[in-house]
Amino acid sequence: MAIAPVLPIEHRATADCLGFPLAEPLTALRTQPAADVSAMDGYALRAADLPGPWRVIGESAAGRPFAGVVGPGEAARISTGALVPAGADMVLIQEDAAREGDRLTLTGTPPEPPHRHIRPAGMDFRRGDMLMAPGTRIGPAQIALALTAGHAHLPVRRQLHLAVIDGGDELAAPGANLADHQLPASNSAMLAALAAQPAVRITRTGPVPDRLEALQAAFDAARDADVIVTSGGASVGDHDLVRPALAELGAELAFWRVAIKPGKPLLVARRGAQVILGLPGNPAAAFVTGFLFLLPLIRAALGAADAMPRPIPAALSESMPAGGSRMEFLRAVWDAGTVSLDGLQDSGALSSLARANALVVRPAHAPEAPAGQFVPVYLL
Ligand SMILES: Nc1nc2c(c(=O)[nH]1)N[C@H]1C(S)=C(S)[C@@H](COP(=O)(O)OP(=O)(O)OC[C@H]3O[C@@H](n4cnc5c(N)ncnc54)[C@H](O)[C@@H]3O)O[C@H]1N2
Ligand code: MOO
């Protein structure tokens, strides 16, 4: 992941930060709650005055506190979230009280301990508390926490610009009438969907024909992207033009080919700060390498603490045949801790990819694994 571009930090409106990793540590700018508040609707009074009765002298509502002091024998009507008035140290819930005019009597059981229905100042966090570490992914709860802690804006990396290019003479636009030598382009839409998130701005180009100048022009048009991802043309055939096109553009090849199945002809290159991922054209190979390489690259560039996908153990529902010379990522269905391999693992097959919700990892040269054995699984 050392190859990931480092995106600059900016301050973004907190409500618009969904999915962005936090770029700097976040400390609380305020204490929550700022003062003691009631957790229930009822009456604020003094525990020492139990068992009552009391005289109701005013009201503390959420956002409209009671200005006076609750003295001996007195009570204030109070609502959930309202400040506990000065003098009071107990909230009697209204179900345990009866009120007639300003006279309040105890009908049920008083709270035990007496402060049970009072949320003390700082119960959630205090000003200066460290709330979130850099790299934390901002989800719905993190948005609410940051806002409550007084942060209208958050430090995050700027949006990553991803350019996705479809290439190949056999590819046609969606919906076109097709001859047998043609098929609808689907990889760039699939990869764009895989990468889609608010922190990523995606542009798509193609299908680009198998001509060096056409591919170079597509790369050139995407020169401002942080990451370019192509699919197809990464292998060894006469029409596999990604490497030659990159060489012409002066991009530096970081590596080409990895010992995984599907996904062998994966290519990674750099052009200045830009990273180019050349994924294989076979759709399942494009998906698997997108999941294993593109998504971690995006997460690392955005500064996520957990850039790499994490496998979980799951039990095989049936035996798994011995593996070959490459590490494999097998399409499977995971259900409640058990995983079933799909019978169709050809890297050109999309039907099994669409059925799968998991990838089972089979190491190179793995012996046959019996049913019930735990294997590492990536949930999709
Ligand atoms: N002699 C060898 N042949 C091949 C090798 C090898 O090592 N030696 N590797 C094989 C492996 S493994 C893979 S994976 C493929 C990948 O090749 P490419 O990345 O060059 O992909 P293409 O040949 O361009 O296309 C493969 C396949 O995928 C379809 N495709 C391509 N792009 C799209 C798209 N955008 N949308 C939908 N489908 C797409 C394309 O039509 C082909 O059917 O190479 C093996 N060959
Ligand atoms: O490595 Mo390729 O993706 O299997 O057909």
Image: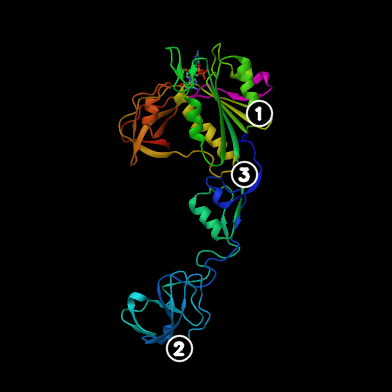
Q: Is residue 299 left or right of residue 111?
A: right
Q: Secondary structure at mark 2?
A: loop
User: Which quadrant would residue 151 be assigned to in this image?
Assistant: bottom right
Ligand 1 lies under 8 Å from the Cβ of mark 3: no
Viewport quadrant of the C terminus: top left
Q: Is residue 270 above or below residue 139?
A: above
Residue type, label 2: Pro
Q: Earlier in the sequence, mark 3 or mark 2?
A: 2
Label 1 residue SS: loop
Residue holding disc 1: 223
Residue 359 in percent (x, y) is at 41, 32
| Residue interval drawn in magenta | 246-266
Q: Type of residue at label 3?
A: Arg
Quarter holding residue 6: top right
> Going by the image, does 25 lie left or right of 259?
right
Image point (50%, 64%), residue name: 124
Q: How is the image coloured?
A: rainbow
